[in-house]
Image (cartoon, grey):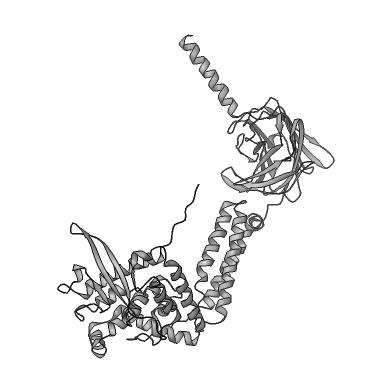
């Protein structure tokens, strides 16, 4: 076989293969679209589709576009009142298309079948300054089958005076200006009817587009707000709920307080409570403050040893040693922390707590929150406001999930509103008079931690040599441990007696509170990571052209 014949055979096979990719199991023998122009400007469609199956199928599906760009203008359509005569069907929105799945999943059909689909379209006409327009793909471009015959009937009010010059008919692939169709006007008693049909067989992907210029006042222009409400009215729910939550937050916000500098933390207020109450959230740093607190009270000590290899620093080993059991002076959550830390013995390595301590950490945080709640430092209606916000967030989430099938953007907005409401819910923390008094003392002391001056610290240490030990836990809870420790550089010559480090950087000959603060801050971060670590779970696995109007779409079989 010559080279030319081989190339010709390859081309034929390629052409056959490309055709087979689009093969369907039916053809459209006759397709009639009737459109009634209703007095309110809506369009009533009736599609009669006569098909012939070449293999057993359940039925057909029809794709109806819900949005198009016509003459450069983005247009959303409202499709409602859908009926399919004598057939069961389901409908589902996928992006900007409404999918009608017609037929019974338990029944197969073959041969000739007729499908009659009816639906109402609103916002389907285009309105300009001097005229209105019907611009529609009466046969869409998304049918993957042959259409042997296509006809249309457009029923307009008989009062209109329209001629052939008001009509444009385009046929063929998208963008084509083909004229493979005829049309004529016909008057009945109540209607002015435009009748049209194609004059050849239409291949898959070819369209029939009809454009009619209409008088400006032939039909009422849809109210913009009404159209928006029908298309996106669901957004009013998250907007209203979000506004209500923001309004409640503004009404129940904490008023600005006059803060006086405090040199001492409030008596009987644990650093866990101090950190949790001042920002309305008991977090891991607040719980970590119990390490220096319990150590300063003689319950434990902390040893840090560097691991080196070839004189290069590699890692640190942290060891806790229990010195005595919990006394009655400890709060329940403080005693829980001490017992959980040494539940396996009087000495524990930090590495042994990895993926284990997180259970106790969460419980301790919950106990601290309950302790704060029991003090009744908040206005009683804040609990209701918070639950109202949670409910509003859940409601917006349901709206968002439901809207995703109709409109992805609307769904995303609803879900975003749900996230915002849930975020705002944590700020429903209006303090009462007693709560404000505690807050002012805590905030006054926190500000002192940030802006303390050495002469004042020197005086405080002179009055109480244990002042640093007593205040370090609060610096941990407030996230100021490195800064606060560094302020004592030159005032203290050794770390607390409960802390021992074998690091050369803070050895006796090179000790400074600044270097101790940097190392202790780093160690607390490491401890926090280990305490909160949990086992990872495993998982698997005017112009115009054909196909340029609204409507159209296509379908297929299933």
Choose between 94 and 360: the one closer to the eye: 360
Q: Residue at x 74, y 51 (%)?
A: 40
In the image, is 47 to the left or to the right of 528?
right
In the image, is 389 to the left or to the right of 535?
right
Q: Residue at x 18, y 68 (%)?
A: 504
Total number of numbered labels? Answer: 0
Which residue of the protein is positioned furthest toward the right in this rendering? Answer: 189
Which residue of the protein is positioned furthest toward the top in this rendering? Answer: 1
Choose between 22 and 531: the one closer to the eye: 531
Q: Residue at x 52, y 15 (%)?
A: 9
What x and y, as percent, mark residue 364?
A: 45, 74
Q: Residue at x 68, y 39 (%)?
A: 61
In the image, is 210 to the left or to the right of 296?
right
Choose between 89 and 270: the one closer to the eye: 270
Q: Residue 200, located in which quarter of the rendered image?
A: top right
Can residue 529 be seen in the rendering of this structure? no
What x and y, as percent, mark residue 37?
A: 75, 45
Q: Residue 558, located in which quarter of the rendered image?
A: top right
Relative to residue 299, is residue 34 depicted above or below?
above
Relative to residue 195, is residue 352 depicted above or below?
below
What x and y, as percent, mark residue 333?
A: 44, 78
Which residue of the protein is positioned furthest toward the bottom in this rendering? Answer: 463
């Amino acid at each position: 076989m010559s080279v030319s014949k081989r190339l010709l055979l390859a081309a034929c096979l390629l052409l056959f293969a490309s055709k087979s990719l689009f093969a369907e199991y039916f053809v459209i023998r006759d397709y009639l679209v009737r459109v009634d122009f209703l007095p309110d400007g809506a369009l009533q469609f009736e599609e009669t589709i006569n098909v012939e199956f070449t293999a057993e199928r359940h039925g057909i599906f029809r794709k109806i576009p819900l949005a198009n760009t016509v003459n450069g203008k983005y247009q959303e359509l409202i499709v409602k009142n859908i009926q399919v005569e004598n057939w069961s069907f389901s409908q589902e929105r996928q992006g900007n298309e409404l999918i009608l799945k017609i037929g019974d999943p338990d029944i197969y059909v073959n041969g000739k079948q007729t499908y009659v689909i009816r639906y109402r379209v609103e916002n389907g006409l285009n309105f300009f300054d001097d005229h209105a327009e019907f611009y529609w793909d009466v046969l869409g471009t998304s049918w993957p089958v042959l259409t042997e015959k296509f006809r249309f009937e457009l029923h307009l009010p008989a009062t209109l005076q329209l001629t052939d010059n008001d009509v444009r008919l385009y046929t063929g692939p998208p963008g084509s200006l083909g004229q493979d169709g005829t049309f004529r006007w016909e008057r009945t008693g109540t209607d002015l009817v435009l009748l049209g049909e194609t004059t050849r067989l239409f291949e898959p992907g070819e369209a029939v587009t009809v454009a009619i210029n209409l008088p400006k006042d032939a039909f009422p222009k849809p109210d913009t707000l009404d159209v928006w409400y029908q298309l996106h009215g669901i957004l009013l729910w998250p907007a209203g709920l979000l506004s209500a939550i923001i309004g409640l937050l503004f009404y129940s916000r904490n008023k600005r307080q006059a803060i006086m500098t405090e040199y001492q933390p409030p008596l009987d207020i644990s650093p866990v409570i101090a950190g949790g109450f001042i920002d309305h959230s008991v977090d891991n740093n607040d719980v970590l403050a119990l390490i220096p607190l319990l150590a300063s009270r003689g319950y434990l000590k902390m040893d840090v040893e560097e691991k080196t290899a070839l004189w290069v620093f590699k890692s640190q080993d942290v060891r806790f040693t229990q010195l005595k059991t919990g006394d009655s002076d400890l709060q329940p959550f403080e005693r829980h922390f001490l017992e959980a830390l040494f539940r396996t013995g009087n000495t524990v390595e930090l590495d042994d707590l990895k993926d284990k301590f997180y259970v106790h950490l969460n419980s301790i945080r919950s106990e601290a929150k309950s302790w704060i709640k029991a003090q009744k430092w908040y206005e009683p209606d804040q609990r209701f406001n918070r639950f109202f916000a949670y409910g509003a967030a859940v409601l917006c989430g349901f709206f968002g999930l439901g809207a995703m099938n109709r409109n992805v953007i609307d769904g995303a907005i609803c879900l975003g509103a749900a996230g915002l409401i849930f975020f705002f819910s944590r700020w429903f923390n209006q303090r009462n008079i007693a709560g404000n008094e505690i807050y002012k003392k805590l905030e006054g002391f926190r500000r002192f931690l940030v802006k303390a001056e050495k002469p004042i610290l020197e005086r405080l240490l002179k009055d109480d040599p244990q002042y640093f030990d007593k205040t370090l836990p609060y610096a941990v809870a407030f996230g100021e441990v490195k800064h606060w420790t560094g302020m004592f550089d030159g005032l203290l010559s050794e770390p607390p007696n409960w802390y021992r480090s074998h690091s050369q950087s803070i050895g006796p000959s090179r000790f400074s509170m600044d270097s101790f603060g940097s190392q202790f801050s780093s160690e607390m971060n490491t401890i926090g990571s280990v305490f909160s670590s949990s086992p990872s779970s495993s998982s698997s696995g005017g112009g115009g052209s054909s196909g340029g109007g609204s409507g159209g779409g296509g379908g297929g079989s299933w």
